[in-house]
């Protein structure tokens, strides 16, 4: 009791001192609030008005009347408790799509902790004596917080201070609500505590570990106090003590990390519920909005959300916007997560326009030209657009002539033409003629891109090559089947989508590009034909509340799709998730994960799907019905270098097959680094890009190509219709690309490129080297016509395919017409 008394007195003194210190600061902050000036857009097509903002619509639980709640102790508390419990337990029915911004990170964190609880708790090197000290600290910590809030209530009663009285009362209500929820869940889940059954932490065994009531009570009281007195000192003390209590429960081995995480989340939510429903704003305290409110997702705004199609990955829009970003005129773009919707592109163009206002010097001349071209292309979106739009986006025709034997087997021998939507090609004349268009109606979008493709036939592989492929892929030797001529109509990106609370939900054939580079993306690119998928993508960046705001703007992207053309085994599924954030305007960090699963021999079950998200260890010993499949982790970054920010950007993409992230074990990771210079000294229209890529890892498991882009069960891993959906470098390769582009205008340019690749001999008998040089030009003519021409010389040497070096010339021309949209 002596130690508990000291904790109680100390907490009372600290909270009282914090309250007194913050009263003046908070009042002064309220007095110093100023009206932010209106931002005038550069575009003259927009009108700026000074109309008063619409009244804020309350979302969620209804507050008490303006006269304020009854802050005295009495019979009404029992009624309030029953009402609070009803709202808490029914809260899942009020979750909105925008809440996925915080529910997804919470769910992923909880899933990761569930998967690692046993190992994490086992390896805590804490002596029994220290464990008892941590347990005592957590007990006294919660008791001290309860005593401090009780003291505030009594202090308010004695001094007739409604604010202190409400703080103590609401903190107590929140604590009781959190304990009621946690104890109900404890008996429902029955999880064993860490010291029981060797840290297995099994559920429904009659235990009471999940969730932590100490963490819930501490965070419920801390969150109320921190919002009643929203000063930095109060928040630091309240949340610091709650965090210490939570950590102590893990160190004392009373709970697993996941128990504490969920308990803390329950405490935070019950604190919000009590404050949101019963707080009287007339007596002081800060505002505590729901996350949906903080993002401006009021009902009337959500219903006005407009559908918007994605910009195709081969569009000139992306290089133009990337150049503006590298020059420092946009700061909120996420280059490693594409495609972007037209509305997202319009937002970035507006951002660049704001930065260019008042600038008319030589440094901004190139940026102004790019901005003007983009502003013209997105005139409809920048002017507000219409609720209903039908647009024939483009009509195009492409012709390609290949003289000499090309490479066209990305999974084994490489590709002469890369990042081309998996279009078929062989030696001789090849062509594709297509169109794209879309329609929008309110929040809904329908998009279609299709083309007729022609490619000549090719002979079957020889017996020697087929034997080698069987060894490389660990498959039976396949029969000699010639490659037939292609004369087919194919849909490329074709989908239906809906804009729901800032999320774009799309179903159909879709392409992705998950990487900061232009020539290669290890996890997902347009090197293969678009796959059928359901995709949920955050349209614009968002910022999480509280300390997570330090991560800066963030974006989410997730999909579940089907891979076609696989034979070993057929019909696999793939899902992936990617989150990127920008802690500074010049640094972008991205974390991604994919899992190929299901298919013949491995049925897709709820258990296997759940484990594919949460299991971070090998699933080799699991039965087929619960196997999580082949999981692949990714990490990427891009950084505008200090002192030369407008001149140099460095970036890297990476992939890990057996580890949760490439950062966990870099020697076992494939890498794709690069540099980008949007301008050169004295040549502001000339840009330079250099990228390297390798999947030939210096580890034993990498021998014979049985590591990156390969799995012991999925022998066609990461392919769609026989093309790798990741990097063109393929398996056991290393290479580099360099290109330099001179821009005559925003859409008129000439580019020279060089590419070199080498494939390891322990994968491909005799190895392989490939080198090519190319030149490409694009011109935009009057009347919405664009013409591009490309020529490439390639030399390759692969003893398995041919006894000596082989060469080929590839020349291509594409004509594209961009008509105007029709809206009503």
Image (spheres, helix red, strand yellow):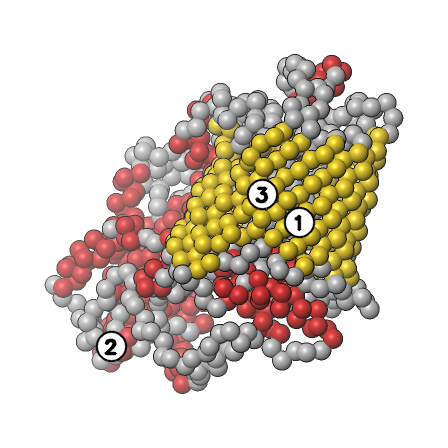
Label 3: element kind: strand
First in sequence: mark 2 or mark 3? 2
Label pair 3/1, CB-CB below 8 angstroms: no
Expressed as whole percent of the image width and height from the top left, the position of residue 79 reads: 14, 59
Q: Is residue 59 above or below residue 486?
A: below
Q: Is residue 236 above or below residue 258?
A: below
On screen, residue 815 versus residue 136, left or right, reads right
On screen, residue 168 versus residue 371, left or right, reads left
First in sequence: mark 3 or mark 1? 3
* Residue under the point 48% across and 81% down: 37
Expressed as whole percent of the image width and height from the top left, the position of residue 613 reads: 47, 38
Q: Quadrant of the C terminus?
A: bottom left
Label 1: element kind: strand
Expressed as whole percent of the image width and height from the top left, the position of residue 707 reads: 66, 30
* Residue under the point 50% across and 45% down: 448
Q: Is residue 146 visible?
A: no
Q: Which mark is residue 815?
A: 1
How many numbered marks appear? 3
Query: Counting other residues with Cα less than 10 Å from the Cα at mark 1, is it few (<14), some (14-19), or many (20 or more)?
Result: some
Expressed as whole percent of the image width and height from the top left, the position of residue 299 reads: 31, 62
Q: In the depicted view, which residue is nearer to us: 356 or 405?
A: 405
- Residue hosting label 3: 434
Q: Which mark is residue 692?
A: none
Quadrant of res 65: bottom left
Q: In the depicted view, which residue is nearer to us: 539 or 581?
A: 539
For the residues labelled 3 and 1, the Cα–Cα distance comes to 11 Å
Q: Quadrant of the N terminus?
A: bottom left
* Residue under the point 31% across and 73% down: 55
Quadrant of res 761: top right
Q: Is residue 788 visible?
A: yes
Question: Residue at the right extreme?
Answer: 804
- Residue hosting label 2: 162
């Amino acid at each position: 009791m002596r130690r508990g008394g000291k904790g109680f007195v100390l907490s009372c003194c600290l909270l009282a001192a914090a309250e007194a210190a913050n009263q003046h600061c908070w009042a002064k902050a309220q007095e110093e609030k100023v009206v932010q000036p209106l931002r005038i857009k550069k575009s003259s097509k927009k009108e700026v008005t000074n109309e008063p903002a619409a009244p804020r619509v309350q979302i969620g639980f209804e507050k008490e009347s303006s006269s304020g709640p009854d802050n005295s102790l009495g019979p009404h508390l029992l009624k309030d408790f029953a009402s609070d419990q009803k709202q808490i337990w029914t809260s899942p029915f009020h979750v909105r799509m925008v809440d996925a911004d915080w529910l997804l990170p919470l769910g992923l964190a909880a899933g990761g902790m569930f998967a690692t609880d046993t190992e994490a708790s086992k390896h805590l090197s804490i002596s029994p004596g220290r464990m008892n000290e941590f347990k005592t600290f957590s007990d006294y910590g919660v008791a001290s917080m309860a005593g401090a809030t009780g003291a505030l209530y009594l202090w308010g009663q004695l001094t007739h201070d409604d604010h202190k009285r409400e703080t103590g009362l609401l903190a107590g209500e929140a604590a009781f609500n959190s304990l009621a929820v946690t104890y109900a869940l404890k008996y429902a889940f029955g999880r064993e505590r860490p010291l029981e059954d060797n840290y297995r932490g099994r559920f429904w065994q009659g235990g009471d570990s999940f969730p932590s009531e100490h963490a819930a009570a501490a965070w419920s009281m801390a969150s109320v106090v921190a919002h009643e007195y929203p000063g930095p000192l109060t928040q630091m003390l309240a949340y610091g003590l709650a965090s210490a209590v939570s950590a102590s429960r893990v160190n004392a081995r009373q709970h697993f990390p996941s128990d504490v995480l969920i308990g803390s989340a329950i405490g935070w939510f019950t604190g919000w519920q009590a404050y949101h429903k019963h707080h009287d704003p007339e007596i002081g305290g800060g505002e505590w909005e729901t996350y949906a409110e903080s993002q401006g997702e009021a009902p009337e705004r959500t219903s006005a959300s407009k559908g918007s199609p994605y910009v195709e990955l081969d569009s000139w829009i992306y290089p133009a916007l990337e150049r503006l970003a590298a020059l420092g005129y946009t700061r909120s773009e996420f280059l490693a997560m594409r495609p972007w919707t037209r509305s997202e592109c319009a937002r970035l163009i507006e951002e660049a326009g704001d930065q260019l206002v008042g600038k008319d010097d030589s440094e901004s001349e190139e940026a102004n030209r790019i901005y003007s071209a983009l502003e013209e292309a997105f005139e409809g979106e920048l002017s507000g657009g219409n609720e209903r739009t039908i647009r024939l986006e483009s009509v195009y025709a492409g012709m390609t002539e290949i003289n000499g034997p090309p490479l066209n087997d990305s999974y084994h021998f490489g590709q002469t033409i890369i990042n081309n939507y998996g279009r078929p090609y062989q030696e001789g004349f090849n062509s594709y003629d297509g169109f794209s268009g879309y329609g929008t109606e309110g929040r809904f979008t329908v998009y279609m891109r299709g083309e007729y493709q022609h490619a000549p036939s090719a002979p079957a592989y020889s017996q020697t090559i087929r034997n080698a492929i069987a060894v490389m892929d660990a498959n039976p030797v396949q029969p000699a089947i010639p490659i037939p001529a292609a004369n087919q109509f194919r849909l490329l990106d074709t989908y239906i989508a809906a804009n729901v609370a800032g999320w774009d939900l799309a179903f159909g054939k879709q392409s992705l590009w998950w990487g900061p580079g232009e020539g290669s993306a290890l996890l997902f690119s347009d090197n293969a034909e678009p796959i059928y998928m359901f995709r949920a993508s955050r349209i614009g960046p968002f910022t999480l509340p509280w300390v997570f705001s330090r991560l800066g703007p963030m974006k989410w992207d997730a999909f579940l799709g089907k891979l076609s053309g696989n034979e070993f085994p057929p019909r696999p599924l793939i899902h992936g998730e990617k989150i990127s954030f920008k802690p500074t305007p010049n640094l972008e960090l991205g974390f991604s994960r994919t899992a190929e699963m299901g298919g013949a021999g491995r049925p897709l079950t709820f258990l296997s799907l759940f484990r594919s998200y949460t299991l971070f260890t090998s699933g080799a010993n699991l039965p087929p019905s619960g196997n999580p499949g082949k999981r692949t982790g990714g990490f990427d970054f891009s950084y505008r270098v200090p002192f030369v920010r407008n001149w140099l950007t460095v970036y890297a993409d990476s992939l890990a097959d057996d580890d949760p992230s490439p950062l966990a074990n870099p020697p076992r990771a494939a890498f794709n680094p690069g540099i980008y210079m949007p301008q050169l000294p004295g040549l502001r229209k000339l840009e330079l890009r250099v990228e390297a890529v390798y999947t030939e890892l210096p580890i034993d498991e990498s021998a014979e190509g049985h590591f990156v882009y390969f799995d012991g069960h999925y022998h066609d891993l990461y392919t769609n219709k026989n093309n790798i959906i990741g990097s063109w470098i393929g398996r056991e390769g290393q290479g580099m690309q360099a290109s330099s582009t001179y821009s005559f205008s925003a859409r008129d340019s000439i580019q020279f490129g060089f590419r070199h690749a080498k494939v390891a001999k322990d994968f491909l008998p005799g190895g392989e080297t490939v080198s090519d040089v190319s030149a490409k030009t694009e011109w935009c003519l009057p009347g919405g016509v664009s013409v591009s021409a490309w020529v490439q010389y390639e030399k390759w040497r692969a003893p398995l395919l041919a006894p000596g070096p082989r060469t080929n010339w590839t020349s291509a021309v594409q004509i594209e017409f961009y008509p105007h949209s029709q809206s009503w």
